[in-house]
């Protein structure tokens, strides 16, 4: 199994690793574990399992974000990562013994269990999940979980057979009913050589879940909402090697999908062919043609909001050639085009599955507002986001300058990074749906 931090798989932390990670968030005169009075704090319980090495990357992400981390390392967890590793990255003391005279005198397990804003278990092994579900308290980790009065977030990691066992599933259901939050597990290859559910979620995904739990419901106003987003170009084949497409990079659509997910939405991203990573917390469906994109959108309904950013080809070749077209003396082949389905108009049409809010995009080269407002009326959507793609750095670039056009007004947004545009649009969508 590949590792973003392979050096941590050993029993020790090399000096190179110490010098690489120690500077994050550490001041020259700071005491270990010091965080501002306003900072959020996490009590991190590291269970046993190969995936424990990922907890080190999780600590790094949290400290970089200014979140205080106090680690509890189980006896089994110490078989995979060392107290020195956790202490160096968390800048705090590592706790491991329930009956430690020193730790009980300095902190005490009851105070330790309530010293943070959130208790995180990563990796949450089948053993820790079982102990928590049944109220056992035989070691520091399980005693802390039983004694805490703070929210608990678990990131399970175990063999696929253990994950699918009825006993484990019963324990998970008990904990969910008790209000415990979960992130993951993922499907994937495991150290034991098997493949399936049970792999620890990646540290950035766990980090986002932690931040969402720390921020609370107010920071995730789209929780419980489903957002459908299209992005990228479509590709209409001419023959097995050629096709009709456009220069859309997909960056704006992907940024919008990620921004909606950060606000709590369940996001389905229908993507044309691009080489971009899937945003955290987003379900991605890959398509090529306009007809495939429409079918994927319809399959994803119902949705509360549809944001149709994709640059969909208006036309396709009537009959795709089965073999590669050869250049010969007769000149270029005659191609007959037919109109593609209109995804925006189709999904804007009134009906039981029409999203409550439908947002279209208009990439224009002239008379931007005039053409976009005509498109708004013609398609039947609620908003149009329009931009002038002749501006340098917009089509395929990192920035955008857009107009938000509704039936009664036009807003001109200042040119900004596409991530910033996505954030502002996601906030506006949340306000509208509220």
Image: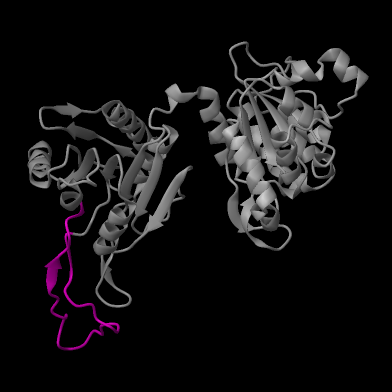
Per the rendered image, the range of residues in magenta is 314-343
Which residue is most to the right?
Answer: 101
Q: Nearer the viewer, residue 98 or 345?
A: 98
Vertical position of residue 421 compared to residue 166: above or below: above
Residue 241 or 171: which is nearer the viewer?
Answer: 171
Extreme residue in the top direction: 37
Q: Position of residue 189 (x, y in %)?
A: 64, 59
Position of 230 relative to 195 (above/below) = above
Q: Quadrant of residue 374?
A: top left
Q: Is residue 390 visible?
A: no
Quadrant placement of the N terminus = bottom right
The image shows residue 142 at horizontal and vertical percentages of: 77, 31
Left or right: 169, with 18 as reference point:
left
| Left or right position of 349 against 177 | left
Q: What residue lies at 28% left-to-right and 40% top-to-bottom?
A: 305
In reply to whether residue 328 is colored magenta, the answer given is yes
Taking depth in this image into account, of 18 and 156 the one nearest to the observer is: 156
Q: Residue at x 34, y 37 (%)?
A: 418
> Can you give x and y, in whole percent of width and height, for residue 372 in the image?
12, 41
Q: Where's the C terminus, which quadrant?
A: top left
């Amino acid at each position: 199994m590949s590792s973003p931090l392979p050096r941590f798989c050993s029993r020790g932390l090399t000096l190179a690793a110490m010098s690489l990670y120690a500077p994050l968030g550490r001041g020259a005169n700071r005491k270990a574990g010091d965080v501002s009075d306003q900072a959020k704090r996490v009590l991190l319980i590291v269970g046993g399992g190969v995936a424990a090495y990922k907890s080190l990357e999780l600590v790094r992400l949290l400290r970089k974000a200014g979140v205080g981390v106090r680690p509890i390392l189980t006896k089994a967890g110490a078989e995979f990562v060392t107290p020195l590793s956790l202490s160096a990255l968390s800048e705090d003391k590592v706790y491991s013994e329930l009956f430690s005279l020193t730790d009980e005198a300095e902190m005490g397990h009851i105070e330790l269990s309530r010293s943070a804003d959130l208790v995180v278990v990563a990796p949450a092994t089948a053993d820790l999940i079982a102990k928590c579900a049944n109220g056992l308290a035989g070691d520091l980790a399980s005693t802390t979980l039983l004694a805490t009065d703070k929210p608990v977030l678990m990131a399970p990691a175990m063999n696929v057979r253990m994950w699918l066992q009825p006993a484990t599933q019963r324990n998970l259901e008990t904990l969910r009913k008790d209000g415990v939050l979960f992130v993951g597990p993922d499907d994937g290859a495991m150290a034991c050589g098997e493949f399936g559910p049970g792999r620890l979620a990646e540290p950035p995904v766990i980090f986002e879940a932690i931040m969402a739990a720390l921020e609370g419901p107010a920071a995730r106003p789209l929780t419980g909402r489903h957002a459908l987003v299209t992005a990228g170009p479509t590709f209409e084949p001419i023959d097995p090697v050629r096709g009709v497409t456009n220069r859309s990079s997909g960056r704006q659509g992907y940024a919008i999908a990620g921004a909606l997910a950060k606000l709590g939405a369940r996001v389905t991203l229908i993507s044309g062919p691009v080489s971009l990573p899937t945003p955290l917390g987003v379900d991605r469906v890959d398509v090529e043609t306009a007809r495939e994109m429409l079918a994927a959108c319809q399959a994803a309904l119902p949705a509360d909001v549809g944001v149709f950013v994709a640059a969909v080809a208006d036309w396709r070749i009537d009959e795709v050639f089965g073999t590669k077209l050869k250049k010969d003396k007769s000149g270029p082949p005659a191609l007959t085009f037919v109109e593609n389905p209109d995804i925006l108009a189709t999904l804007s049409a009134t009906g039981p599955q029409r999203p409550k809010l439908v947002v279209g995009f208009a990439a224009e080269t002239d008379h931007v507002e005039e053409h976009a407002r005509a498109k708004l009326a013609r398609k039947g959507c609620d908003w149009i986001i329009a931009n002038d793609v002749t501006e340098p750095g917009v089509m395929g670039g990192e920035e955008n300058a857009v107009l938000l056009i509704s039936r009664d007004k036009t807003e001109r947004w200042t040119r900004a990074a596409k991530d910033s545009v996505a954030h502002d649009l996601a906030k506006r969508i949340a306000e509208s749906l509220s």
